[in-house]
Amino acid sequence: SRLYLVRTFGPVGGGHGWAAEHGQAPSVSHGALTVHGDSRLYLVRDSAGEDWARHSYVRLDLGASPLRFTIDTSNVPCGCLACVYLVSMPDPEAGRSNYCDMAENVAPGYRGQTCIEMDILEANSHAMQAAIHTEVGGEYGSGNCDRNGCFMRVGGPQADRPRQNSYGVGNDRRINSARPFDVEASVDVQGLTIMLRQEGVRVTSFDPRLAGNPQGQGVPAAALQKTLSAQGTLALVASMWRANDLAWLDGGCGQCDLSRASFTISNLQFSGMAKPPPPPPPSHPPPPRPKPPPAPPDPVQPPPSPPPPSPSPPPPLPPLP
């Protein structure tokens, strides 16, 4: 039955692949993933295989090594969202991906635990949000990292005023979304930190002290601890969708044709990623052959005997008479 089949694209990162659950097929070229239209994809260990039950998710630990990638959101207009995020979801099984999150798809997570969600970015070309979700339910302004998340925004009218020009279209923005930019996400005892970089400019898109529910209240200690505990259980997800009202992010700057929208992730790096084999050691000339051992010395010969003494000359003859 095709219910059990999954389309997988790759390879990326030393044999890993992207499993597509629904939507338009992505494209993968030289390790770069381009997401088209309404779709959701998961990073799996093997780029081959068409059966969900044969796949398992790559598990990331941002405390051991940051997640880094380059992203191009220039073709994601107002009204659409490009999403790159991590969820503590179980491995797939026959017929299903076992996807979960903390908002619309609430279900038990990895090994029956809470399906912790860390949104590295939810963005279009005009505005961006990053958030963590450690509790189900809740409401905006609760002070907890619930379904609304402890969030921080850059770019657009819903960001704090000092950060409204940090991201967006145009050279007057610190990160110009008309061009690709780099993303780095890491976790330490202070929580999640996300940094954007482009042509020597750095912008912090998530800081636990500046995020919150509402923004600016800070991430509570309990949520920081859950973020730390989730490391090593997190699966990487890339998706794109649209909503009739994204005013909470971009101010309602327009609608988008989702079928024509796309974004690209390249230069993906993460903990546990297969590394290329090291180059062979430089060749050296063969070592010189060992010199033969010196010949043993000749046996000691006794010194030659001195020559015998010369005989004494005969006595002279007597004179003649």
Image (spheres, rainbow, N blue to C red):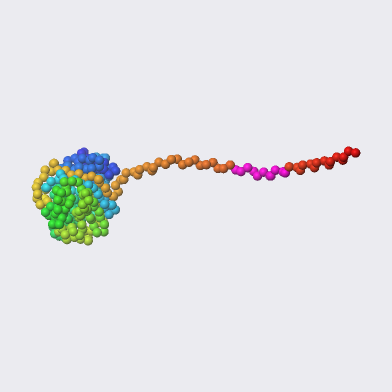
Question: Quadrant of residue 265 in the image?
Answer: top left
Q: Residue at x 16, y 46 (%)?
A: 178
Residue 55 in picture, x, y percent from top left: 26, 44
Q: Residue furthest right?
A: 321
Q: Residue at x 12, y 51 (%)?
A: 250
Q: Quadrant of the C terminus?
A: top right
Q: Quadrant of the N terminus?
A: top left
Q: Nearer the viewer, residue 130 or 205?
A: 205
Q: Nearer the viewer, residue 304 or 228?
A: 304
Q: Is residue 155 left or right of residue 88?
A: left
Does residue 200 show up? yes
Residue 121 among those drawn in magenta: no
Question: Magenta part of the protein: which range?
Answer: 296-306
Image vertical order of residue 65 relative to residue 220, above or below: above
The total number of labels drawn is: 0
Q: Nearer the viewer, residue 262 or 38?
A: 262
